[in-house]
Image: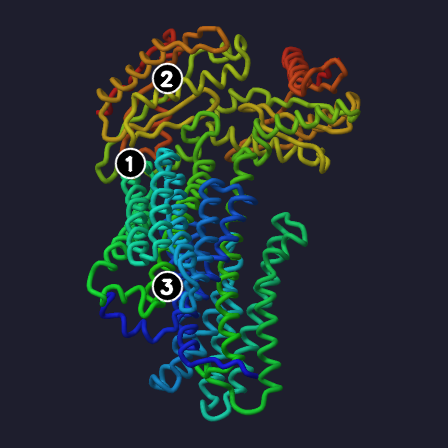
Amino acid sequence: MNWVVTAREMQTLLVANIGLYLLLAVAWWSLAVVARLSPVASWTLAGFNLTAGAAVLLRSERGLWPDSLTLWPSDVLLLMSFALLRAAIPAIARRALAWRLGVAVLLSGSLILAVLPYEGDLRWHARLINLGLLSLVLVAAWEAHGLLRQAGLRTRAALGFSWPMFLLALLMIGRAVDSLVQPGPGLDLRTPTPLNYVSLWGTLVLALVQNANFGFLVLLRLVLRIRELAEHDPLTGVYNRLAFEARLERAYRGFTRGRDFAVVMIDMDRFKKLNDALGHAAGDAALIRLVQAVRPCLREVDQLGRVGGEEFALLLPDTDLAGAALVAERMRELVVESGFEWLGSAWPLSASFGVAAARPEDTSGEAVLARADAGLYLAKAQGRNLVQASD
Amino acid sequence: MMAVSMTPVLNALDAPTLFGVVAVFHALFCGVWLLLARVWRMAPRASHAMAVGQLLSTLNALLLASLPARVGAWHEFAVQATALVAVSLVVLALRRATRQRRNRLAWAWVGGGGLLAVLLASLAGLDGLARSLAGFSMVAQAGWGLWGLRRATRPDEPVWIVALLGLSLAGFVGMGLLRGLTPWLDPRWEALFVAQGAPTSLLALSQWLLMALAGVGLINLLVWRLVSRARNLLRRDSLTGALNRRAFQAELVEAQALLKRGMGFALVVMDVDHFKRVNDSVGHAGGDAALRHCVRLWRDCLRDLDQLGRLGGEEFGVILWDADLATATLVAERMRERLNQTPLIWSGKTLTLSASFGVALPRAHDAEGEIGLARADAQLYRAKAQGRNQVCVAAEAA
């Protein structure tokens, strides 16, 4: 091969790699401290970049700095950086840091490396380290993929976020194969060969892609959380009024194209009395109990929203008035049977229901809701704990 | 001076390789900003400006990497122009993100004028003058952004983010000054950035660092806004923007803990009178507007550190820090008067609203502040019973 790599170019690439890791560590640190973006994950990723940079720095100075600094410590730092990477993945989804596998690999790896002599052929060291890194990266990639699927992403989108880690794993496998095929001792990082040059460029680009990818993952988590918070009532977990109304209007648009829907209004009976007698905390618990009680009646497509203090509305797609009244009657029974207790004393719950189905003369989803509301008033007036359909 | 002493270290580096790394870095972040702008719709204008700025920086780095084999005046102009426009786009992005006044005309004049001057100078073969003009034009742009930064951010935004943005802009100003002055100084100074016709590692590193700093600052700002939005959604009532009950209770627990260490506070509880009637006469949307109206008026009567929370449908509570019973009564009276004298106009109807208020002081042995709140609540009931639209105050504990 005619391609000549100069020692100066190698030196520059090494400095660029180390500088980039440092810069990325500072960036994650600032996100953790200043913007307070998932602080645990951000701190861990700052640690990943910092230890990776330190490992490359020590490794590149082999033969120049004392061996006690550059041999064993550099390998341990490399293992540590990947252990941090693996630990950070669940932290991005606000779960506990996954430190067990990392600690196991780090401890066993550093013990074995401490026993192996750092002389002559270092290929066994390299294979061992690669094996440890590969296991960490594979587990991390697999878990990231799973978490993304859980967050509701399709396989393709989830792969779009997790491929850089699978790529990293592939690189590890490539290196391991290379160490088996290549005769002679492992090369120094500084040695100016085309292979070393290309692999340094590779780690540089991969570090960038990897970190950008983690940034996207953390942001994705934040955006999904904001969407959830903006659409749901924090107390009961059902849709808030704005989100419910949006779904109601969507159902109405479907109705104009021939798909029926019905609405049930639910209002807890004597809620004010409960609040005054037992306090607001009891009132909250009763609302949560009510939602729990009616949940078994809901199909996957039904949508429950909290539209007022103690008022809920249920949207039933592809349902007529009779069907909706049946569902409401079943819910009424379940609420009565719910057996609510507060601080040991029982307080019987009940609710009144108003039912309405969409009709051709309705001009909006809101009109159907208003008719259900009228039915609810009737139920209240007739003595509560009733279902009243408005036709 | 530091730069001069560091030159030997930097000379050990290969500038073209370094420019290659810088080009890769900028190209990747161009993609990142594009994704942020197009897919995530995060501050699309600022993100688009950043993306184009990063693209131009990529071009600039590639041009600089090939500068030793340069091909004349147009090449020189392209180098200066890409650097200049990249910086002005970054400044534009920072100005947008910090809500500085939009002034497209001034931006076009400063940028375009600088660009034209650089073009003329490089066509005339005056490389030194072209570099100098590009440097001073950079100073003008970045200085403008820096000047606007003084008042552009909101008081609740962390000072660190502003400092980071200011630092990167100040860096651009310093860099522009150096580049503007060096052609006229001792050749030793000129050699900092361009040695024997080739750009130096220092130039590559300083440009990289400044662009990266601006990017990190901007990302911090955008992310911080997202995070605080999530926090607000958790803590605030979505209708009125007052604290929701959970957050208010948490504040109350904290206040009660501080009370034991000598920090006094007072509690006011209020309830809008005849709210059901409001709802019936103007509908649910009108009722919502009435609640917003109340919160807006009441907040004007409170200090920034006082906490206003929505406790239930039309019931609100206030923690008044460092207030005794007389002060709290005064504040409650002011809130009552304010609401009663400012009618709500809703779809053509004029609604005069009123509210009843209960005021009480907490006691050191109250459990978790709930009992203090109950005491204020009892006064609220008394106010309701006595005919509404008034303030009732609990007798001070002996």
Q: Amino acid at mark 1?
A: Arg
Q: Which residue is mark 2?
A: B380
A107 in relation to B252, above or below? below
The quarter in which the C terminus of chain A is drawn is top right
The answer to whether residue A91 shows anywhere in this view is no
C-alpha separation, residue under disc 2 versus residue under disc 3 = 69 Å
Question: Which residue is nearer to you in this view: A210 or B167?
Answer: B167
Tag 1: Cα neighbours inside 10 Å, few (<14), some, or many (≥20)? few
Q: Nearer the viewer, mark 2 or mark 3?
A: 3
Residue reaching furthest front? B124
Q: Which residue sits at x=48%, y=53%?
A: B55
**In the rendered structure, are the residues bearing label 1 and label 3 in contact, judged by CB atoms less than 8 Å apart?**
no
Which circle marks residue B318 in the picture?
none
Q: Position of residue B20 (x, y in %)?
A: 46, 66
Residue that mark 1 sits on = B151
In the image, residue A361 lies at what x, y percent?
74, 13
Q: Is residue A196 left or right of residue B95?
A: right
Alpha carbon separation for disc pair 1 and 2:
43 Å
Q: Residues within 10 Å of mark 2 (few under 14, many from 20)?
A: many
Q: Residue at x 48, y 22 (%)?
A: B313
Residue that badge 3 annotates? B204
Q: In front here: B292 or A15?
A: A15
